Image (cartoon, grey):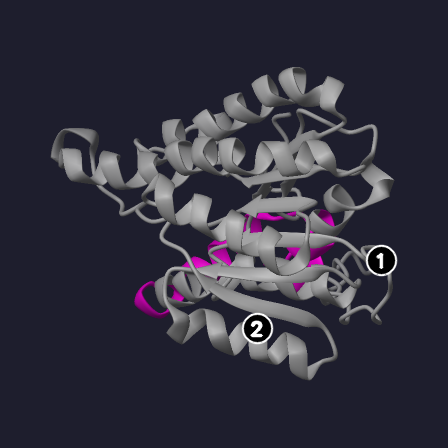
Amino acid sequence: MDVTPPSAPASASTPAPGDRLRGRVAIVTGAGQGVGEGIARRLAAEGAAVVIAARRAATGEPVAAAIRADGGEAVCIVTDVTARAPIEACVAATVQRYGHLDVLVHNAFAGGVASRLEDTPPEAWFQMSTTSAWASFWCAQAAHPHLAASDQGRLILLTSPSGVEGSANIPLYSPAKAAQRAIAKSLAREWGPDGITVNCIAPVAETPALTGAFAQVPTLRGAIEARTPLGRIGDPTTDIGGVALFLASADSAYVSGQTIVCDGGSFLGL
């Protein structure tokens, strides 16, 4: 009997444009590349006006231009999430331009360099906690009145499976990401009466950073694919963007305070 397992299916092709978010306005931080770009493209393809909140115009503007070239609505607003003022300015500029804000996706993150705890400088913790926990706090405070005014206010934070199970290689990355899950759970309780849902996505996807790691460690791709039941690495637009679309749309109206791990099944601890 032939017991050779079937080859893993390839990632689904990019879905046809729809209108599930028609009339909605979304901000996606860190949308100049990788997962943030994929989410922004997917939300725009479903009719949302998307603000590409990128640290550098050199990365954010091309993404916004590509969305517009595909028939969507997008603008880049240069935003440094390591401070409160730029986040508040981005939200204010978004509302001034479009009149309202319905969805905020905080994806931007810096840090995560592998090192032992005893060898990790304090600066590394400052960088990781600032772009994860602190930026989530600032995004939430700036966006809350506008999300509360929307009939479908959504806050989505990008966390990591490491925030649940820990990490032996990047010990400070895990608590930084775990803090985002705690923020989401607390805000889901506080903001529920305002009609706002708050959720997290914990992704594994092909990003520029991961591609660079593959180049440095040729065996890494195979190791990740081997431990993933679906046998492949996620696509930022079709795989991660699809989950973000669900959480941003009316389909998730009764889902709040949750973390959706989108990693092909490699982490099953929730």
Q: Residue 11 in the image: x percent, y percent?
A: 72, 65
Query: Badge 2 local density, few (<14 within 10 Å), some, or many (20+)?
Result: many
Residue 237: quarter of image? bottom right
Q: Is the magenta stretch mostly helix, strand or loop?
A: helix
Determine whether, in the image, residue 235 is placed left or right of residue 12: left
Q: In which quadrant will I find the N terminus? A: bottom right
Vertical position of residue 81 compared to residue 56: above or below? above
Q: Is residue 61 above or below residue 50?
A: below
Q: Which mark is residue 64?
A: 2
Please name whichever residue, 80 or 183, is drawn nearer the observer in this view of the structure.
Answer: 80
The answer to whether residue 232 shows anywhere in this view is: no
Q: What residue type is labelled 1?
A: Met
Q: From the viewer's perspective, is 254 left or right of 215?
A: right
Give the residue displayed 80% in from the left and 57% down from the top.
23
Which label number is shown at residue 161?
Answer: none
Which residue is the site of mark 1?
Answer: 1
Instruction: Mark 1: give few (<14), some (14-19) or many (20+) Cα within 10 Å.
Output: few
Residue placed at 24% from the left, 35% from the top? 126
Asked whether 217 falls inside the magenta stretch, the response is yes
Above or below, 62 against 203 in this view is: below
Secondary structure of the residue carrying numbered label 2 = helix
Q: Which of 145 and 12 is in front in this view?
A: 145
Rendered residue at 26%/41% (across/down)? 127
Q: Quadrant of the C terminus?
A: top right
Tell me whether circle 2 and circle 1 mark residues in contact (CB < 8 Å). Answer: no
Chain part drawn in magenta: 214-243
Q: Nearer the viewer, residue 33 or 65?
A: 65
Q: Where is residue 166 in the image (x, y as percent from the top left)?
A: 42, 28
Residue 267 placement (x, y as % from top left): 59, 36
Mark 2 and mark 1 lie on one chain; the one further toward the N terminus is: 1
Amino acid type at circle 2 is Ala
- Please give the name of the residue rendered at 38% of the width and 27% of the height, measured from the top-left corner: 175
